Image (cartoon, rainbow, N blue to C red):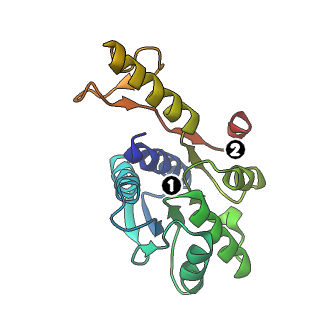
């Protein structure tokens, strides 16, 4: 799946949220996964490019926090910033870190329903947080689709067929040997579809 698309969906959600409030400039706290990891890099690029494309000026409220995809680490790293830093939203490269941020908000007496928090991966806990109203959105990364498409692509290559035949997914415009399984944004409006 195109990691940059996960960031684009986060940006789309945040841009709509803040435009409804009449804001075109926001301050964000960013929770990164592992530094140097492709997912971390591309999800981050995607959200920042997406906000800019949508006409939102996004300013760092703090240096990015490398919480290594970990819920507890994210909670520990973000906690000192919540009452000392002016911020409008929390952007996380995955659901685990977003949930750590939500726990930190709650422990500081800040209602997460008043601060948009976005994650990625549509984990069971992430989807529950959306239902609870504490996580605003996440992205579904279709593991079943990825596994199925990988096996079907291998069969197709062995049989000399187009790599994406019978997968239901598209190939890359620049490389016909890449099959893209799309991310899907998950919000309160469609979270039940992913259970």
Q: Position of residue 147 (x, y in %)?
A: 51, 34
Residue 82 falls in which quadrant of the image? bottom right
Q: Residue 102 sits in which quadrant?
A: bottom right
Q: Nearer the viewer, mark 1 or mark 2?
A: 2
Residue at the spot 62% in from the left edge and 75% down from the top edge: 72
- Mark 1 or mark 2, earlier in chain: 1
Local packing at callout 2 (Cα closer than 10 Å; few below 14, some 14-19, many 20+) is some
In space, the residues marked 1 and 2 are separated at their CA atoms by 22 Å
Residue 162's disc is none
Residue holding disc 1 = 22
Q: Residue at x 52, y 65 (%)?
A: 69
Q: Which residue is mark 2?
A: 188
The correct choice, above or below, for 164 with respect to 59 in the image is above
Residue 189 seen: no
The kind of secondary structure element at disc 2 is: loop
Q: The N terminus lies in which quarter of the figure?
A: top left
The x and y percentages for residue 44 are 39, 58
Q: Residue at x 51, y 62 (%)?
A: 92
Q: Residue furthest front?
A: 158
In the image, is 47 to the left or to the right of 174? right
Task: Identify the residue shown where x is 38% and y is 48%.
Answer: 50
């Amino acid at each position: 799946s195109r990691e940059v698309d996960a960031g684009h969906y986060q940006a789309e959600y945040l841009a709509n949220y803040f435009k409804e409030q009449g804001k075109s400039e926001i301050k964000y706290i960013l929770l990164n996964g592992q530094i140097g990891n492709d997912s971390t890099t591309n999800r981050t690029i995607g959200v920042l490019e997406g906000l800019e494309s949508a006409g939102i000026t996004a300013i760092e409220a703090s240096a990015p926090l490398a919480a290594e995809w970990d819920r507890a680490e994210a909670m520990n790293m973000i906690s000192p910033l919540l009452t000392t830093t002016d911020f409008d939203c929390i952007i996380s490269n995955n659901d685990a870190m977003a949930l750590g941020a939500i726990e930190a908000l709650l422990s500081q007496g800040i209602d997460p329903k008043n601060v948009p928090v976005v994650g990625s991966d549509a984990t069971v806990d992430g989807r529950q947080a959306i239902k609870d109203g504490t996580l605003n959105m996440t992205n579904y990364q279709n593991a079943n689709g990825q596994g199925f498409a990988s096996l079907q692509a291998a069969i197709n290559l062995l049989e000399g067929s187009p790599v994406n035949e019978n997968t239901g997914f598209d190939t890359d415009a620049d490389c016909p040997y890449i099959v893209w399984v799309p991310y899907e944004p998950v919000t309160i409006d469609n979270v039940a579809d992913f259970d």
